[in-house]
Amino acid sequence: MHILSLAPTSFFGDYGCHVRILEEARALQALGHHVTILTYYKGSDVPGIRIVRTAPTPWHRHYEVGSSRHKFAFDVLLSIRLLRVLSRNRFDVIHAHLHEGALIAGVLARPWRIPVVFDYQGSLTDELLQHRFIKANSTAHAIFRRVEHMADRIPHAVLTSTRHAASALRAKLGDRVPVQALPDGVNAQVFRPDVISAEERAHLRARWGIAPDEPVAVFLGLLAEHQGIRNLIAAAARLKAEGRRLRWLVMGYPGVEMWRQIAAGAGTLPEVIFTGRVPYAEAPRMLALGDVAVAPKLSLTEGSGKILNYMAMALPTVAFDTPTQREYLGTLGVYAPVGDSEALARSVADLLDHPQRRRMLGEQLRRVAVRQFGWDQAALTMTSLYWQLLTRSKIHPVHNRKHQDETIL
């Protein structure tokens, strides 16, 4: 099959949403399918992945991660590029990411009668509220809630990043649109606890000013309010006030300097170390520096794929108790009430005080990651859904790959 992955974001960046897009494409290609990713102008190219980009906006070439008013212009350019690509090529399925992607593909691809699958990664309005792009109960809130309502109903099928989201959407949509859970996955051959030697681990720790015997709590993800970074800093301050020796390795972007200033104001420097952006290829080596992992995400609807990386690295994980995070960790997670920084600190401290429990939890979490969350299984789920949609619409799959290669741009 020829699959067009529509990604209304600056792919590839080193964070969760982009990792899902990338690993889905890799898994589909491993089964012999052909994937083209249509995305914004900026972003890093990935070897082995065909990427088609929009034209840049002349007034804002260096845009930021996350919600931005400039995204309206980017989505117009994405729509124009989509029409051009569809007019010159044939695809079997459009796999549209995020609500913007579902809405754009659902409307513009209709003349070509191509099935559209919406890859749902969380509520649009919830994300905008978490990013403080809109205010609760405002006119903008009502508008975006309506847009989300339309986007949820316009595709031919929906894949959700969590089972919790699938249940919530089924309750909202009824039988109108088929909804299937497609949990995030992890490459357990890449993310594994023995990815570096003990000597390399000591050397890399020293590079970040961490002594060999210092315990380390790791976080990897976007540095945003809804990721609970402020709660992490508060937990670090709490344990420091108790005289506990502990380093917090906080890996990600954007806003590193802002968060560093907040940490300084809380008195948690140099205990909290902000590394900045960590390339996805380097993530396993950096996570290997940790003794425990933290997942203080506050959002109740977004996926939390980073937890699977922690699990594959055999890192016992302390998380805020949300349905999504419990879905991955199950009974093997260590939970704190959502937003409770003191409970987060207590849970981290308790794990550090019990090394045998840490080791046992880590080993069990890795076994679960390997057995239940491989991207190869996700690819089979996606292709099965694609075939169902093609069979229902009586559309024959595209076979002329050479023609695709010559005309895609």
Image (cartoon, rainbow, N blue to C red):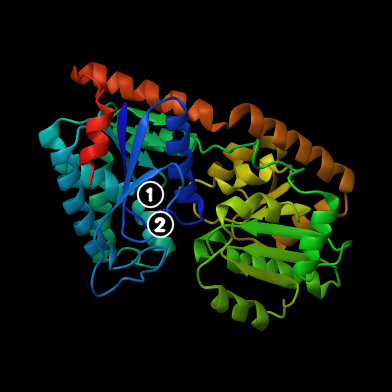
What's the mark number on residue 123?
A: 1
- 251 over 295 or under it: above or below: below
Q: Can see residue 277?
A: yes
Q: Is residue 278 rendered to the left or right of residue 123? A: right
Q: Secondary structure at mark 1?
A: loop
- 309 over 72 or under it: above or below: above
**Of residues 185 and 159, the one drawn nearer to the viewer in this rendering:** 185
Residue 327, quarter of picture: top right
- The x, y position of residue 174, in whole percent, is 30, 29
Question: Which residue is rendered at x = 64% and y = 68% of the image?
Answer: 275
Q: Amino acid at mark 1?
A: Ser
Q: Secondary structure at mark 2?
A: helix
The reply to whether callout 2 and callout 1 are in contact (CB within 8 Å) is yes
- The x, y position of residue 124, in whole percent, is 35, 52
Residue of label 2: 127
- The x, y position of residue 175, in whole percent, is 28, 26
Q: Can see residue 343?
A: no
**Of residues 228 and 33, the one drawn nearer to the viewer in this rendering:** 33
- 93 over 336 or under it: above or below: above
Q: Amino acid at mark 2?
A: Glu
Question: Which residue is rendered at x = 89% and y = 61% of the image?
Answer: 213
Question: Which residue is rendered at x = 35% and y = 32% of the image?
Answer: 34
- The x, y position of residue 271, in whole percent, is 75, 72
- The CA span between labels 2 and 1 is 6 Å
Q: Is residue 283 rendered to the left or right of residue 400? A: right
Question: Which residue is rendered at x = 24% and y = 34% of the image?
Answer: 404
Q: Which quarter of the figure is the N terminus placed in?
A: top left
